[in-house]
Amino acid sequence: MLLDPGSLFFSILFSVIGIGYFSYGKKHNLYFMLSGVALFIFPYFVTQMVWLIIVGLIFTLLPFILQWLMPID
């Protein structure tokens, strides 16, 4: 994992969003819970900052898209 300030900032940012999604998803929605797990695990595997941002944004928006396409009651 690279320790330049940008990568470190986005890793922490997406991990915090992932923890929020996970805690919300435990009570309300499976899509948010799974996306939350992915958000706080993927920074360990993605090292380039551009891909970190792209994959983070995809995992951040994914539960909203899935909920719109396949609603869970």
Image: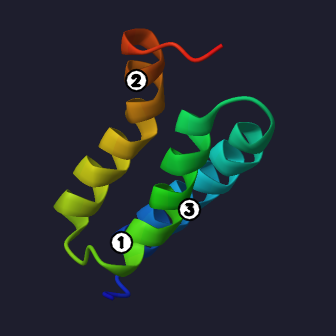
Q: Residue furthest front?
A: 73
Give the labeled residue for mark 2: 66
Residue at image x 49%, y 47%?
Answer: 35
Q: CA distance from mark 2 to mark 3?
A: 20 Å
Q: Amino acid at mark 2?
A: Leu
In primary-sequence order, the first of circles 3 and 1 is: 1
Q: SS of the residue at dot 3?
A: helix
Residue 28's image quarter?
top right
Q: CA distance from mark 1 to mark 2?
A: 27 Å
Above or below, 32 relative to 9: above
Asked if marks 3 and 1 touch (Cβ < 8 Å), the reply is no
Instruction: Left or right? Give the position of 10 relative to 72.
Output: left
Above or below, 61 relative to 70: below
Give the labeled residue for mark 3: 15
Residue 24's image quarter?
top right
Residue at image x 70%, y 47%?
Answer: 20
In this orientation, which residue lies closer to the viewer: 12 or 55? 55
In this orientation, which residue lies closer to the viewer: 9 or 45? 45
Give the labeled residue for mark 1: 7
Q: Position of residue 55 (x, y in %)?
A: 27, 52
